[in-house]
C-alpha cells in the first residue's frame, strides 16, 4: 500500500515526502493532526492580508543548497526583516547595534562605547549578551548591563519564565549585540518571503500522485506501537514500511519516561481600521504588557488596503492537549529525558525521527529543511 507513512505535514515531513516520491518513486501517506498542511508555517488571508497563523516566519539562510531547494516550489519576494524594541519610550533596532546606541545614550558616551566596541570586536560581528556581560571594561559592562536589563531580562521572563542565564545560552545568542549599523534582524546571504505564501509552497511541494494526505487525524487513532514486540500497526495491520515521525517523541512512546516540557504561545490577531499600525513588521515589548511582540503582516506581504492585521504573542506554559508545543525548553534534565526516548527509539528499526518536536530541538526553518535533506540521504535512501 504505502512504502512510507509520515506523521506531520510541516517542513520536516513535507520535505521528506517530496524527496521520497520524486527521487525514490515510492508511495507516501502523510497523517496530519491539524486541518491543514504546512505545520507552524501555515498562512492564510485575513481581510486579504496574508498572515502567519502560528507567528511570524521569515525565511533566511546562508545555505545555497537550502535556498535552491525551496526555490523549486516558490518564487520569492525580497524581504529583510526589521524589528524594533520599545524601551524607555523609544523604539530602537533589535539586535541592539550602533544606531540603537546613539538613540539611547548621549552622543559623547555613545562615541566612547562605539570606540571601545570596535577595539574589542570585529566590525559587523555579533556578541551574545551573556558574553558582553563578562567584559571587564567599565563602559562595556555598563552597556551590557543596560541591554541585559532593558532588552533581555523581562522579555525572557515572559517568553521562558526564566532568567537569561537559566536557559540555554544559544537561545539568547540568537539575538546578539551587533557591532555595526545593519538594522536587519538577520544577516544571512539569502532572505525572502515566498511570493504566494508558505501554504502555497507546501501545496506545490506535496502535489504528487504518490502522496496521499490524511488531515484531521491524530496518529494515535490509526497507529499502534507495540513497545514489547517493537512492531507497529497501521489500522490494525502490521506496517512493514517505514514510519517517519515528526511529532512529539514523548507522545509517540506514551510518555513512558515522563513529559518533555515546552513553552507555548497564545496568538491574538486583531484587524484594525487603519492603513498601518506601527513602523516595521515587528515591535518587541520587553518591559511592557503581557505579550512579547506585535507583528504587522502588511510589511511582510504588502497589499493595498485601508485595513491592517496585527498579531500579539502571549507566551504560556504548554499544557498537553490544551495548547501548542512551540519551543522545547532546553535544560540538562530535559535533555537527559529526551536522550532516554532517543535511546529507546533505536530499538525500532523502521522509525525515523525528525523535526523540532521529534528531536526536541529549536530548529529554524532553514535548519530543519537542511536536516530533512540530510536525513533523506543518510537514513531514508
Ligand atoms: N530575546 C529577548 N529580547 C528580545 C528578543 C529576544 O530577550 O527583544 C531573547 C528571548 O529569550 C528569546 C530569544 O532571545 O526567546 C530568541 O529570540 P528570537 O527572536 O530568535 O525568538 P523566536 O522568533 O524564535 O521566538
Image: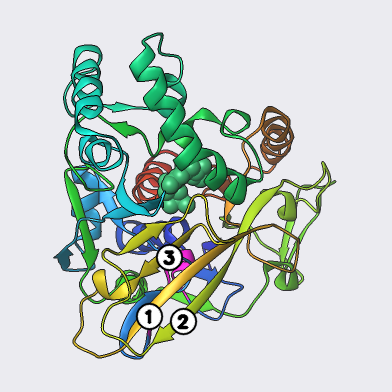
Give above or below for 65 relative to 242: above
Relative depth, front residue between 325 and 104:
104
In the picture, residue 241 is in which quadrant? bottom right
- Residue 126, percent across and down? 29, 28
Q: Which residue is more in the foreground, 269 or 155?
A: 155
Q: Which mark is residue 270?
A: 2
- Choose between 123 and 112: the one closer to the eye: 112
Q: Is residue 77 above or below residue 64?
A: below
Measure the alpha-carbon separation of dots 3 and 1: 10 Å
Residue 46 visible to the viewer = yes
> Which residue is at 31% across, 39% downward?
96
Provide the residue span drawn in magenta. 37-45
**Outermost residue to the top:** 136
**Residue visible at 60% across and 51% down in the picture:** 158
Q: Earlier in the sequence, mark 2 or mark 3?
A: 2
Figure quadrant of residue 302: bottom left
Element under disc 2: strand
Q: Looking at the image, which is closer to me, 291 or 166?
A: 291
Disc 2, ligand 1: is the CB inside 8 Å? no
Q: Residue at x 56, y 55 (%)?
A: 246
**Horizontal relation, residue 94 to residue 343: left or right:** left
- Classify mark 3: helix, strand or loop: strand
Circles 2, 3 touching at the beta carbon (< 8 Å): no
Label 1, secondary structure: give it.
Answer: strand
**Residue position for label 3:** 294
| Badge 3 or badge 1: first in the primary sequence | 3
Label 2–label 1 contact, CB within 8 A? yes
Whether 208 is among the magenta residues is: no
Amino acid at each position: 500500500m504505502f512504502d512510507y507513512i509520515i506523521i506531520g505535514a510541516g517542513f520536516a515531513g513535507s520535505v521528506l515526502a517530496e524527496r521520497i516520491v520524486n527521487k525514490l518513486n515510492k508511495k507516501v501517506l502523510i497523517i496530519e493532526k491539524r486541518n491543514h498542511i504546512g505545520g507552524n508555517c501555515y498562512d492564510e488571508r485575513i481581510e486579504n492580508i496574508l498572515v502567519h497563523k502560528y507567528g511570524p516566519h521569515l525565511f533566511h539562510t546562508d545555505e545555497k543548497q537550502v535556498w535552491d531547494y525551496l526555490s523549486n516550489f516558490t518564487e520569492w519576494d525580497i524581504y529583510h526583516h526589521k524589528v524594533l524594541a520599545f524601551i524607555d519610550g523609544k523604539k530602537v533596532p533589535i539586535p541592539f547595534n550602533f544606531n540603537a546606541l546613539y538613540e539611547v545614550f548621549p552622543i559623547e558616551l555613545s562615541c566612547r562605547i562605539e570606540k571601545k566596541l570596535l577595539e574589542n570586536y570585529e566590525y559587523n560581528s555579533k556578541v551574545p549578551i551573556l558574553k558582553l556581560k563578562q567584559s571587564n571594561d567599565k563602559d562595556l559592562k555598563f552597556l551590557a548591563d543596560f541591554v541585559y536589563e532593558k532588552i533581555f531580562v523581562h522579555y525572557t521572563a515572559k517568553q521562558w519564565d526564566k532568567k537569561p542565564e537559566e536557559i540555554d545560552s544559544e537561545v539568547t545568542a540568537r539575538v546578539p549585540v551587533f557591532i555595526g549599523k545593519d538594522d536587519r534582524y538577520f544577516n544571512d546571504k539569502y532572505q525572502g518571503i515566498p511570493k504566494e505564501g508558505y501554504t502555497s509552497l507546501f501545496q506545490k511541494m506535496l502535489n504528487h500522485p504518490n502522496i496521499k494526505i490524511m488531515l484531521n487525524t491524530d496518529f494515535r487513532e490509526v497507529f499502534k506501537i507495540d513497545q514489547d514486540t517493537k512492531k507497529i500497526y497501521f489500522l490494525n495491520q502490521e506496517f512493514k514500511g517505514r514510519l517517519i515521525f515528526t511529532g512529539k517523541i514523548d507522545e509517540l512512546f506514551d510518555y513512558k519516561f515522563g513529559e518533555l516540557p515546552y513553552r507555548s504561545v497564545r496568538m491574538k490577531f486583531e484587524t484594525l481600521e487603519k492603513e498601518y499600525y506601527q513602523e516595521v513588521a515587528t515591535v518587541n515589548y520587553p518591559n511592557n504588557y503581557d505579550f512579547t511582540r506585535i507583528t504587522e503582516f502588511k510589511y511582510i506581504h504588502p497589499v493595498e488596503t485601508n485595513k491592517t492585521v496585527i498579531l500579539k504573542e502571549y507566551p504560556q506554559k504548554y499544557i498537553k492537549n490544551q495548547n501548542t508545543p512551540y519551543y522545547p525548553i532546553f535544560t540538562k534534565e530535559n535533555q537527559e529525558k529526551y536522550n532516554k526516548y532517543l535511546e529507546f527509539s533505536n530499538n525500532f528499526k523502521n522509525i525515523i525521527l525528525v523535526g523540532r518536536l521529534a528531536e526536541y530541538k529549536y530548529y529554524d526553518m532553514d535548519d530543519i529543511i537542511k536536516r530533512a535533506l540530510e536525513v533523506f540521504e543518510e537514513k531514508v535512501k
